[in-house]
Image (spheres, grey):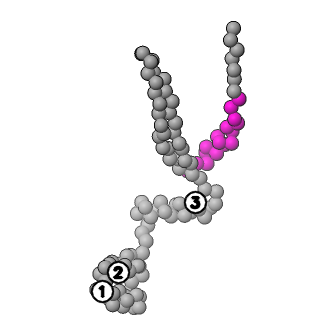
Amino acid sequence: MSATRTTALPDCAPVFDDLNRYEVTTRFNGQSTVTIAGNRATGESYTIAHHLFTERPAARSLERLVSWITSSKITGPAVHVLPMAQAEEAHRLLETGATTGKIVLRP
């Protein structure tokens, strides 16, 4: 009769306690190894998961703001792109308050 050996697993409770707190989970497929022997195959693979959650209300508000901007629910200030040759015009727009957005001078 052979003896069965058991190995105690580490306590995973701290990991599972936070599962409902994650706001975003990204998974990256890792390496897989498959062994084929006759008509049998065995294998191992792993996945790396990155979980994100915020604890501070300000960070949660910032995430919400970024999601509104990326989904175009709100827009930022106008951006005026002018050629460098119109630098004088760009300066005039800033001085007179004719623009409330940003001005970019393109070479």
The reply to whether dot 1 and dot 2 touch (C-beta < 8 Å) is yes
Q: Position of residue 91 (x, y in %)?
A: 37, 89
Question: Which of the numbered marks, if any, corresponds to residue 30?
Answer: none
Distance between mark 1 and mark 3 Cα atoms:
41 Å
Q: Earlier in the sequence, mark 1 or mark 2?
A: 1
Residue stretch in magenta = 8-23
Q: Left or right: 9 with respect to 93?
A: right
Question: What whole-number distance in Å separates the C-alpha atoms at marks 1 and 2?
Answer: 8 Å
Relative to residue 98, is residue 72 depicted above or below? above
Q: Relative to residue 37, is residue 56 depicted above or below? A: below
How far apart, in angstroms, are the residues tagged by discs 3 and 2? 35 Å
Q: Which residue is mark 2?
A: 105
Of the numbered discs in the image, which one, if any, rests on residue 60?
3
Q: Are the two marked residues, 1 and 3, in contact with CB atoms closer than 8 angstroms?
A: no
Residue wearing tag 1: 86
Provide the secondary structure element on which disc 2 rests: strand
Q: Looking at the image, is mark 1 or mark 3 earlier in the sequence? A: 3
